[in-house]
Image (cartoon, grey):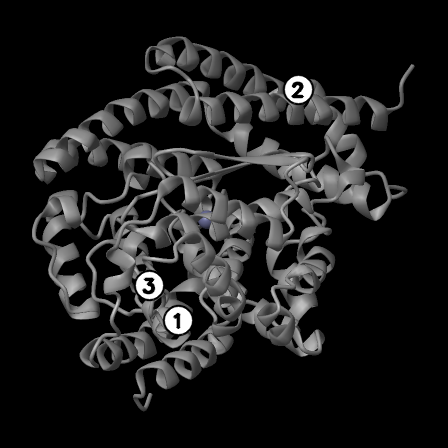
Amino acid sequence: MPSTWDRFSQRMAELRDLAGAIGILTWDQETFMPKRGVAARSEQLGTLQAIAHERLTAPELGELLEKLAANKKLSGPQHAMVRSVRFDRQRAVKIPGKLVRELAERQSHAVEAWKEAREKKAFGIFSPHLDKLLAIRREMADAYGVPKGGERYDALLDGYEEGMRVKRLAPLFERLKGWLVPLVQALADAPPPRDDFLKRRYDPDKQWLFSLEILDAMGFDLDRGRQDRSAHPFTMGVDPDDVRLTIRIFEELPLSAIFSTIHEAGHGLYEQGLPREHRRTALCAAPSMGLHESQSRLWENLVGRSMPFWESFLPQMRVHFPEALANVRLRDFYAAVNRVERSPIRVEADEVTYNLHILLRFDLELAMLREELDVTDLPGVWNERMSKDLGVKPKNDGEGVLQDIHWAWGELGYFPTYTIGNLYAASLYDAAKRSIPGLEEHIRQGRLATLLAWLREKVHTPGRLLPAEEVVRSATGKGLDDGDFKAYLEGKYGTLYGVKV
Ligand SMILES: [Zn+2]
């Protein structure tokens, strides 16, 4: 008879296989699936998700976990596997099947309504759906259980950023806003750098070739992954040996492909660097969304928008686009990729204004979940906050409260992970610079491998062995904080814009 551990491992492996199959079907849906395949695909995904849920919540797995949790002889990694699966399982069993189905159904209606509302720029079409989703999410938060000394929002946040609490985030975000708002004011009032050369024609095929050169330089292994095109860039990690990235290409917006490549490859390198010896276990995963995002942001912003990076890559880019980049100096190119603008749209925001978009969403979803803000008042409050924090007023709900799909999916508690990622990224890069002598010189020469090796060791290899903040703490000596991010932005943009900050 197989041991308790073997029976548990077998079940854990099956759960990972199911998740992998769901991932591949989802990836295919966004990339190659013919349009009319959507009905069959939803059924396939629905079936697989139901099976995965059934397996995770099966009483036998619960019994195995309880037995193993009491076993003092487990190794560190074994203990972490039991802890992780137990965490996921406890969350899954707490939600009654009826509520899961209700949420799924509401979500699909809400997404349809959101699409229509956004197109017609009419929040009223979406608001009754959001109201219902909020009611379901509140019910779910109560079912998960409010952590001790916490609140409902924490119960949802735990699903993306395990262990993080409003009590930690709210004051940190308040402090962040306190110095970001004046920084944005100072930069946005300064004369903007020229970027006319980024609006010229850049051949899409050549953009694709250049993106592959960037992937290669970053160390993304195309024998263990691939890159394709989709409407919205994303990364799907199925296994360290099968990681799929997607990017999008616009003929007259060359930065879109470049930075979606660098961003998604940052996620992809993390996935390829997860601990192989723990394949088909709960440890071969990131401990939080924020830590995952720290990897994409570190590469995209700290590396990809730095002078050393473009010293190496602008000459390479010029080979593909000699006409569009004729007479464009390195300095001008660097300034253009770091242009700070008051934009109402989050996904177009630069790294200085970006977090203000997130802080606004965090405050509003927190208020809605606390029942302090009525859904019908949302557009007004949104627009007011945009003017106050960012100095820009959305022209309509389409470029205001309706711009993101997250709330239509019923995702509340997800947005803060973007800012957590940005803060972790700044701290990790600062620590990398301190530990790797001559790092910027390596980047200047296009040698990105030393940075990757450091990230592999410090961030990728632990997988889900430790909580996200512990991974960061052991790499940088500190937990979640805005100090390094502040020093980074003020140093970089103060010099670039010649303003005193
Ligand atoms: Zn990302």
Q: Which residue is mark 3?
A: 350
Image quadrant assignment for residue 31: top left
Residue 218 visible in rendering:
yes
Residue at 60% from the left image edge and 26% from the top image edge: 20
- Vertical position of residue 174 compared to residue 257: above or below: below
Compare residues 358 and 377 and report the one nearer the observer: 358
* Kind of residue indicated by mark 1: Tyr
Q: Which residue is mark 1?
A: 334
Give coordinates of residue 372: x percent, y percent. 21, 52
* Kind of residue indicated by mark 2: Pro
Q: Quadrant of the N terminus?
A: top right
Q: Is residue 109 left or right of residue 418?
A: left
Confirm or deny contact between disc 2 and disc 3 (CB under 8 A): no
Instruction: Confirm if mark 3 falls within 8 A of ligand 1.
Output: no
Give coordinates of residue 196: x percent, y percent. 23, 64
Mark 2 or mark 1, which has the lower sequence index?
2
Q: Which residue is mark 2?
A: 59
Q: CA distance from mark 2 to mark 1?
A: 57 Å
